[in-house]
Image (cartoon, helix red, strand yellow):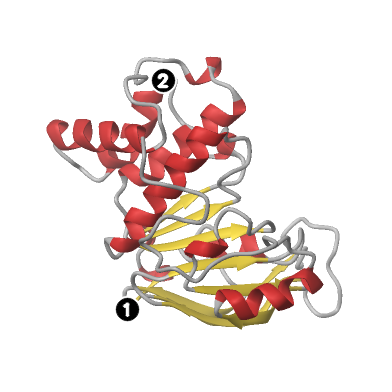
Amino acid sequence: MIDATGVTCRYGRPGSGGSDADDGGGLVAVDDVTLSVPDGEFLIVAGANGSGKTTLVRTFNGLVEPDAGTVSVNGAPVSDDLVAARSAVGMVFQDPRDQLVAATVGADVAFGPENLGCSHAEIDRRVADALAAVNMAGREDERIASLSGGERERVAIAGALAMEPDHLVLDEPFTGLDEPARRSVLDRLRALRAAGTSVIVVTHDLRDVLGLADRVVGLSAGRVAVDAAPREAAEELPELDVRVPAAFDDRPADAPAAGETDDP
């Protein structure tokens, strides 16, 4: 369970080096948000650029420290143990360059499990499983510098998957992915959700994922403007400049999405 209570985040507050400080203590990016993500839920956090969605989810594992309010993961305050929080909440950034740390694909995906102290055999298993999940099996020795932008995005996703977190947050995960990679990632997210992992997708475009969601939270100007089941949310989100599919079905989250099959 992820619990955020009264979370407020400001930029440009005095002493931060920003230029947007005002008498209220800075530009508010997230404004008094209270939100819980139950274990196993597939949640979409939607909103236009600048709505606060990325800042909010980065409080879930301590990448951003709230100016007010609290965040806890699995019952423990994030601020008490950042290592535990970041092990429990995997994060995939919108720009993979922000999180790729090694020279080769395999070394990058192995970085997280190595820091967890996993055995060599366990690291190899996790790397192989994670790369297979994003259609990059057998490419461990390729250099990151030689990859396309879409391939780097897939490596970043694999790195988060290799941590086998309780909760997985993905910020605009389909940017730059081709169709086979997109399908593979969707299948993996569906399987993770079915296995009990919380999946949180941050996006301004719900066309790929709305049919998988249990719930949609829409942000506007840092506040929760929508918190509803997918069908109800789809009616309200266009007002927040969020793209929704023209139609979608309410099939269970572990069933193939509309237009997809289980065929290889």
Residue drawn at x 36%, y 15% is 141
Q: Secondary structure at mark 2?
A: loop
Dot 2 or dot 1, earlier in sequence: 1
Number of numbered labels in the structure image: 2
Side (left or right) of 228 relative to 194: right
* Label 2 close to label 1 by CB (< 8 Å): no
Q: Secondary structure at mark 1?
A: loop
Task: Give the residue at mark 1.
Answer: 75
Judging depth in this view, the residue of 135 and 117 nearest the camera is 135
Location of the C terminus (image quadrant): top left
Residue 32 visible from this viewpoint: no
Judging depth in this view, the residue of 142 and 115 nearest the camera is 142
Question: Which amino acid type corresponds to the residue marked 1 in the rendered image?
Answer: Gly
Task: Give the residue at mark 2.
Answer: 104
> As displayed, is residue 45 above or below residue 24?
above
Q: Residues within 10 Å of mark 2 (few under 14, many from 20)?
A: some
> As displayed, is residue 99 above or below residue 208?
above
Judging depth in this view, the residue of 38 and 250 nearest the camera is 250
> As displayed, is residue 176 above or below residue 61?
above
Side (left or right) of 144 relative to 106: right
The part of the image, by quadrant, that contains residue 199 is: bottom left
Residue drawn at x 36%, y 39% is 263
